[in-house]
Image (cartoon, rainbow, N blue to C red):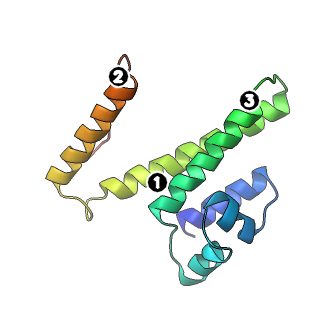
Amino acid sequence: MTFTEQTYEKLSTITNLSTDEFSMDWLGQSRSYYSSNKARGLEASISALVKLMNKLTDQTKALETGTSHPLLLNTAKQYQQLANDVATEVAYRSMKTSLANQTVKEMLYKIVSQMNDKKYPASPAIVLGF
């Protein structure tokens, strides 16, 4: 089972959705994107996964805003965990040994660190393992 299939399965336990809705509303792709990729054993693109992360974090914020209801907060936590899983997959794909040599990995690490410093000057650097 691919990462994308696992993600769809997890998301479908949080909210009721069809494969078409997953493709269009969550991955930002055509109606048959997920079904087609699944049939061919392909993963979603990094671009589609970033769109998924955007949707997941938007859902998290919407559920957390102005509520203390345990069910809504639990659902928000599930969305956030799934967003973290997707972020890990995106980082993993970006840093895969077969895709990037050591110089490229160091460049990516440096850029992520600079971006983090610029956006959050008081925060510690993000560390990505090689």
Question: Which of the 4 image quadrants contains residue 128?
Answer: top left
Callout count: 3
Name the residue tied to disc 2. Answer: 124
85 left or right, relative to 61: left
User: Label 2, label 3: how many angstroms apart (C-alpha)?
Assistant: 26 Å
* Kind of residue sitting beneath label 2: Pro
Of the image marks 1 and 2, the number of the one nearer the N terminus? 1
Asked whether the beta carbons under mark 1 and mark 2 sit within 8 Å of each other, the answer is no
45 left or right, relative to 93: right
10 Å neighbourhood of mark 2: few (<14), some, or many (≥20)?
Answer: few
Q: Residue at x 34, y 22 (%)?
A: 124
Q: Which mark is residue 89?
A: 1
Q: Residue at x 62, y 41 (%)?
A: 57
Residue 26 showing in the rendered view: yes
Residue 46 lies, with reference to residue 34, above or below; the image says above
* Kind of residue sitting beneath label 1: Glu
